[in-house]
Amino acid sequence: MKNKKPNLKTIEEPARQLEVYQEAEVVVVGGGPAGVSAAVAAARNGADTVLIERYGHLGGMATGGLVILIPHLSDGTERLAIAGQQKEWLDRLAPLNGVIHPPGDSIGSSDPKLVKQWGGYRFFVVDGKIRLSAYVDPEMLKCVLNDMVLDSGVTLCLHSWGCRALMDGDSIMGVTFESKEGRKAVLGQVIIDATGDGDIFASAGADHDATLDPKLRSSKLALVFRVGNIDYERFRAYKGKETQTTSIYETGSEESSYAKTMGELNRLGGFTVTMPTPRKDVVWFNNWIPDLSCLNVKDLSRMETETRKKMLLTYNFFRENVPGFEDSFILDTASQVGTRGSRRLIGEHILTEDELRSGTAYEDTIALFPPLTCNASPEKPNRCIPYRSLLPRNLDGLLVAGRCFSSDLVANDIMNLIPPCVAMGEAAGTAAALSVRHGVAPRAVDYTKLRDRLVDQGVPLPELP
Ligand SMILES: Cc1cc2nc3c(=O)[nH]c(=O)nc-3n(C[C@H](O)[C@H](O)[C@H](O)COP(=O)(O)OP(=O)(O)OC[C@H]3O[C@@H](n4cnc5c(N)ncnc54)[C@H](O)[C@@H]3O)c2cc1C
């Protein structure tokens, strides 16, 4: 037997030569809503593009995390507030029976018949008007995202974990990734960090903040699961009116039997949020633990084991106490930990809560998003994201898209939903392609050209201030 090693606190990893797996113009790390959109936009705008994703499918939280609600794509009028690639998801999912949403000609309507028809889905009706929001089938979405990426000519590296930025002074020139082939490098002129957690910008030395606020949704790690073979009509009748607010706790209508039943579940130590899905016999459940970090192995392990216990408690309780669940079964659990909050870039512009609440528009707006709880109005205008929130302060060759974009905690909590992440990805990919084409750094991309390209791609943007 070898002698026991001394009690080492660190150990030196020997330096080694890495094979360059591929050289591209644009390299996107992370294949969630932001990363897919970035890669597709870069490739459609003419850039030779590689997309690196650690798992075997695309979609991030929207597929592997079973986050199936895509909310607030219109602002209360018939106008769409987010379109572009986000709309393309819905259009491609429709023939696969992979999505449910109110039809295009009902958007903005307050017709009582339509409001009654769609009121059973959370976020389909806001302030008495039909909004475009959608529930998607995560398995169909995986297929659609594969098609979008491959059709646009992106080179896809699945089962490849992006590790570290490769730097040339203050410029990023590529990334290393780890796979069953070992550790290799991919080089690019522009790198887009769409890992959600800012893995690449952190290793590049970009300024960032990883604090969490236990009061906000972004500090909750979640396990989403789906229950199949339920009798949805009986469940709906028992549950009563679907809440149309953003409240995350399942309460049911006040004093209803459902509210009392949920009170009993709470007393037993369980809680949940349920949502409908595109299939009538399947219901979506979410349970979570607050104040945990998805960057911490102990927290992640605790979350995976404790939420699974909570899931069993909740599911058994529903089967025994809630009409419609008698013959149900647990269909699946999310293969990816449910996480919204992580590292946030400290970029050229830090989007703030005040700016969002006052509807500040920028000279470089790349996306807008309607307020969640009410229809957009002069008092509650759409919220905007500037291009500068995707740009690090101190590094070149790097763009950031998705939930790790430059924002304060509350602004991030409001804007890390799927539609803004898709919109950020589409803008980052388009900007990266323009940066390559015109031979300028991402921060020097001409905003007028970027805006024109985004508008051509169907992205709604506000009038210039
Ligand atoms: C429980 C829960 C409920 C939610 N509810 C809603 C909702 O109803 N509607 C809504 O719009 N939003 C909701 N959200 C928020 C939303 O899902 C996310 O904020 C959004 O998906 C973020 O998109 P993203 O592309 O930035 O990141 P992610 O979706 O996290 O995607 C990141 C991708 O990068 C990959 N990746 C990460 N690190 C690496 C690496 N080092 N190398 C390679 N690949 C890597 C991941 O595997 C993943 O595919 C919810 C989130 C949770 C957790």
Image: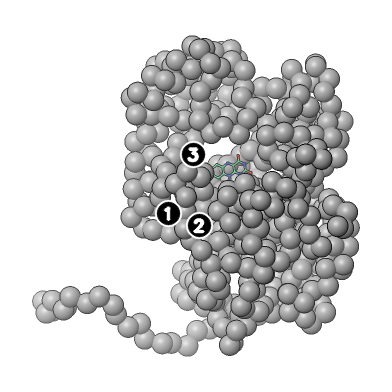
Secondary element type, mark 1: loop
What is the crowding at mark 2: few (fewer than 14 residues within 10 Å), some, or many (at least 20)? many
**Residue on which the image places disc 2:** 342
Secondary element type, mark 2: loop
Compute the Cα span from label 3 to label 2.
Answer: 18 Å
Compute the Cα span from label 2 to label 1.
Answer: 7 Å
**Residue on which the image places disc 3:** 224
* Residue 226 visible in the displayed image: no
Disc ID at residue 96: none
**Residue on which the image places disc 1:** 293
Q: Are marks 2 and 1 in contact (CB under 8 Å)?
A: yes
Viewed as shown, does residue 25 lie left or right of 262? Answer: right
Q: How is the image coloured?
A: one colour
**Residue 247 locus on image (x, y percent):** 56, 32
The residue under label 1 is which amino acid type? Ser
* Residue 407 visible in the displayed image: yes
Asked if ligand 1 lies within 8 A of label 2, the reply is no
Closest to the observer: 223 or 244?
244
Compute the Cα span from label 3 to label 1.
Answer: 17 Å
- 397 versus 408 height, above or below: below
- 214 versus 96 height, above or below: below
